[in-house]
Image (cartoon, helix red, strand yellow):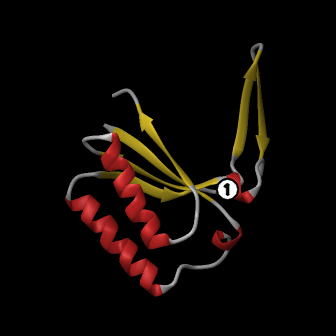
């Protein structure tokens, strides 16, 4: 089962580099998930983005930002695990390293 773990931005995540302890712990966590074959991809996302909309055959493209910083998805991890519960546990481990914040877990369907 694949899941997309998403982190949302907030005031503290904009422009402040993470401290050395957080970087070390996150590096160990990422290495552990990679060796276990669970982590498929990870990365940060530009919170501004580009909005694209199709309506009645017309496609409109608009540059962001679109949402408040706390609502913008700013990072992700794509994982392949045995269950929903395992995805939740990995996300809880992530947040125990990062500290305060907010995110979402979404199951990915398809090949």
Asked whether, in this view, residue 67 is left or right of residue 72, the answer is: right
**Residue at the disc numbered 1:** 47
Q: Which image quarter is the C terminus in?
A: top left
Q: Position of residue 19 (x, y in %)?
A: 51, 84
Quarter of the image for residue 89 reads bottom left
For residue 7, side relative to residue 82 (left or right): right
Residue reaching furthest to the bottom: 20
Q: Is residue 70 left or right of residue 82?
A: right
- Left or right, residue 111 beside residue 4: left
| Residue drawn at point x = 63 percent, y = 78 percent | 16
Residue ID at (27%, 51%):
38
- In the depicted view, which residue is nearer to us: 60 or 67? 67
Above or below, 57 relative to 89: above
Element assignment for label 1: loop
Q: Is residue 13 above or below residue 103?
A: below
Assess disc 1: are there few (<14), some (14-19) or many (≥20) residues with their C-alpha within 10 Å of its C-alpha: many
Q: Residue at x 69, y 49 (%)?
A: 49
């Amino acid at each position: 089962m694949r899941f997309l773990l998403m982190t949302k931005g907030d005031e503290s995540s904009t422009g402040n580099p993470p401290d050395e302890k957080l970087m070390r712990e996150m590096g160990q966590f990422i290495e552990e998930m990679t060796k276990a074959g669970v982590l498929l991809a990870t990365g940060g996302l530009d919170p501004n983005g580009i909005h694209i909309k199709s309506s009645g055959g017309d496609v409109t493209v608009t540059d962001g930002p679109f949402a408040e910083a706390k609502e913008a998805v700013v990072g992700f991890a794509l994982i392949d695990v045995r269950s929903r519960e395992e995805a939740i546990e990995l996300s809880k481990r992530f947040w125990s390293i990062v500290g305060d914040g907010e995110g979402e877990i979404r199951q990915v369907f398809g090949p």
